[in-house]
Image (cartoon, grey):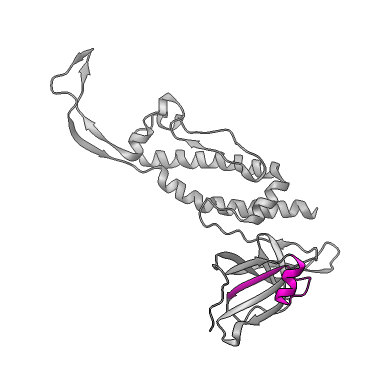
Amino acid sequence: MKEINIGKMNKKIYICTPRTTQDEMGQDIMTYEKGKRIWATVKSVRGGEYYDALKLSPEVSYIIYTRYRKDIHPDTILMYHGKKLEVKHVADIEEEQVMLEIQCTEYKKKEQIMDGLEFDGLDDLVDGLENAVSKYPDLAEAGLKREQRDFKKDMIRETWSAVDKHTGNLVRGFRFSAIRGNRSNMETDFYAEGSKKGAHFHLVNNGHEMVTVVSRNGKKVKGGGKTVGFVAGRRIKEPVIERWHQEHAKRAEKMLEKIHEEIEK
């Protein structure tokens, strides 16, 4: 096979699965759900000269390169950056069953795609969610406030299960910052030591050295300040944060479903 400059296959494309549902009047409607994910190179096609050079139909708006597979054919619907793309032509490059060149147009019909959210870590919400949140920021903010409340409750439960003495001071500093940003850029911070009474949480969580008394009644104690041991950390917040990586993804998906319901009203 000749070397073909297709760039890095670092773009996520989804092969959409058609599904027939019924509307409120009992009529069949076609919708599409995200299916298999593939990695590809995506090139946007613009300009008459580019069309002529590649011998493309003027309606083609994207060229996609990906590894050879048998489940992509004309009329297949793909999803890229929240856009539905209709496959117009598929070519097996040099007929070696190694690489495909796929020519696509933007899908013009009005059916909605129900996005299956996928998290590659908390850092990464899919484009479909960002677009939806930008249109319904109030729903997004309400969802984030519920997460603040429930995360704090989870932290308190985890703390009480990890420590022997429940004075209340350890959890009294748990708080969130005000929600910042707007639309799809909302964020908030959690503080475990948001008050003076809870300022020792890091010692309980991370562990600390045991040091002899330095002074008593304003007087230095002879031999004070010596390290005599180490108290292991209880590691309270780490399992909570890990659980909420998954919980946040589930809630984001539910929120997106709710936004779709609002759109369809």
**Looking at the image, how many numbered discs can be counted on the residues?**
0
Residue found at the very far left of the displayed protein: 222
Q: Residue furthest bottom?
A: 95
Horizontally, is 230 left or right of 159 in the view?
left
- Image quadrant of residue 27? bottom right
When the figure is inspected, residue 240 is found, relative to residue 228, above or below; the finding is below
Q: Is residue 243 left or right of residue 234?
A: right
Q: Nearer the viewer, residue 126 or 204?
A: 126
Per the rendered image, the range of residues in magenta is: 47-66
Residue 38 seen: no
Give me the residue at 42% from left, 48% from top: 239
The answer to which quarter of the image holds residue 111 is bottom right
Residue 237 in view in this figure: yes
Residue 220 at x, y = what percent? Answer: 18, 16
User: Who's the residue at 73% across and 55% down the image?
Assistant: 260
Q: Position of residue 141 (x, y in %)?
A: 65, 41
Q: Residue at x 58, y 33 (%)?
A: 178
